[in-house]
């Protein structure tokens, strides 16, 4: 009788390019608890950011103070958006690298992702500074409160992501991130991509939609 | 039994990941595609009266459409939903659908679609 189920090791031997992150786990769903927990967390984050985006839509017309059209620098924010979008590429390449067991490239891509994220945050800090100088403080209007809360909350998420990426980089440098822990990088990657898709929403709704 | 190079890898073990796994080239092409969409989005600002969006209503529709394309592309390719177990897709879209429905209800409560005489 032919065998139909193979051990993970034999499959990995058969295809060195096989992504070990997607192997079957000994859980009811076949998915690791960590990954399942991250997806559930991201689903709950949809509700959180949905609330903040809805509040912004409701309050985006200021009764006093500068209007969005007067202060937004669309070319600058577009560049920041592009930087964050490209960080998703470097993140997925990092996941791909560790799945292949290429630790050098893993470190390069993790570092690049953290750097691009930091560039995005620097841009946001600069943008906020300019807005405050132009008279748009947190309590200036209902629009400013909603705007700073939404984009600031997203910025905090990016910052947490950068900390996680740096932790991964540190673990990798100390040799504590072998191939069989590729899923750890993948889970951090899921968080990072989610932060990116949230910005896709924010960029369109806050900055572009008239 | 060890696998030989000619054996087909059982997809029940790897959940189809080997057969359909996106390589780095696909990731780069996806990023270029996303970048191109971002350029089109920015064009709606740079060229406010382009023939594809002659008025604000159409422009909003185009922007929402492009936003959705970017969102699903990142979720399916970069977040590996396309290659992973379906239950993850269900979880994520359950949260997303719930969020969209709840907040459409909230916006409707505040009469955002039809402001009326108090708008």
Image (tube, coloured by chain):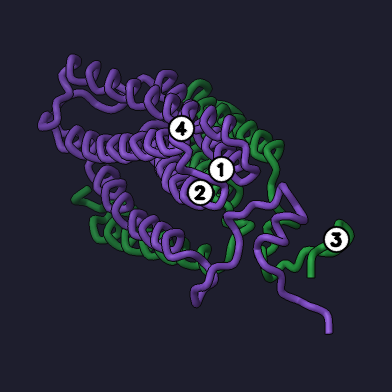
Chain colours: A purple, B green
Image height check: is B29 above or below A13?
above
Foreground residue among A184 and B83: A184
Image height check: is B15 above or below A176?
below
Decide: marks 3, 2 in contact (CB < 8 A)?
A: no
Residue at 57% from the left image edge and 45% from the top image edge? B78
For the residues tagged 3 and 1, is the chain the same?
no
Q: Position of residue A141 (x, y in %)?
A: 14, 33
Q: Which residue is mark 3?
A: B4
Label 2: how many residues lie within 10 Å, few (<14), some (14-19) or many (20+)? many
* Residue A209 visible: no
Q: Which residue is mark 2?
A: A186
User: Which of the two discs, 4 and 1, sits closer to the camera?
Assistant: 4
Task: Say which label, 4 or 1, has the lower sequence index.
Answer: 1
Residue A95: image tag: 1
Task: Say which label, 2 or 4, has the lower sequence index.
Answer: 4
Q: Which residue is mark 4?
A: A173
In this picture, residue B23 sits left or right of residue A108: right
Query: What SS does tag 4 mark?
Result: helix
Query: What SS does tag 1 mark?
Result: helix
For the residues tagged 1 and 2, is the chain the same?
yes
* Chain of the residue on which disc 4 is drawn: A
């Amino acid at each position: 009788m032919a065998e139909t189920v193979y051990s993970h090791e034999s499959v990995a031997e058969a295809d060195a390019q096989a992504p070990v992150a997607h192997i079957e786990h000994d859980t009811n769903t076949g998915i690791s608890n960590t990954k399942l927990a991250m997806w559930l967390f991201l689903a709950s984050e949809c509700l959180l950011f949905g609330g903040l985006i809805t509040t912004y839509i409701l309050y985006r017309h200021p009764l006093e103070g500068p209007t969005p059209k007067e202060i937004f620098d669309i070319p600058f924010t577009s560049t920041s958006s592009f930087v964050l979008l490209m960080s998703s590429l470097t993140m997925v390449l990092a996941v791909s690298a560790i799945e292949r067991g290429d630790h050098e490239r893993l470190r390069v891509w993790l570092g690049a992702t953290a750097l691009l994220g930091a560039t995005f945050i620097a841009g946001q800090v600069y943008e906020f500074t300019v807005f405050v100088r132009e008279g748009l403080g947190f309590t200036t209007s209902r629009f400013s409160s909603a705007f700073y809360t939404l984009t600031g909350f997203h910025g905090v998420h990016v910052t947490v992501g950068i900390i996680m990426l740096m932790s991964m980089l540190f673990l990798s440098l100390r040799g504590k991130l072998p191939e069989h822990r590729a899923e750890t990088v993948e889970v951090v990657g899921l968080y990072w991509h989610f932060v990116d898709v949230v910005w896709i929403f924010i960029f369109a709704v806050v900055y572009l939609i008239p | 039994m060890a696998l030989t190079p000619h054996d087909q890898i059982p997809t029940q073990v790897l959940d189809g990941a080997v057969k359909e796994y996106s390589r780095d080239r696909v990731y780069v092409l996806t990023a270029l595609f996303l970048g191109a969409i971002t350029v089109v989005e920015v064009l709606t600002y740079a060229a406010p009266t382009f023939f594809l969006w002659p008025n604000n209503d159409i422009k909003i529709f185009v922007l929402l459409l492009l936003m959705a394309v970017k969102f699903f592309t990142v979720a399916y390719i970069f977040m590996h939903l396309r290659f992973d177990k379906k239950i993850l897709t269900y979880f994520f879209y359950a949260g997303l659908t719930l969020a969209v429905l709840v907040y459409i209800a909230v916006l409707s409560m505040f009469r955002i679609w039809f402001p009326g005489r108090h708008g």
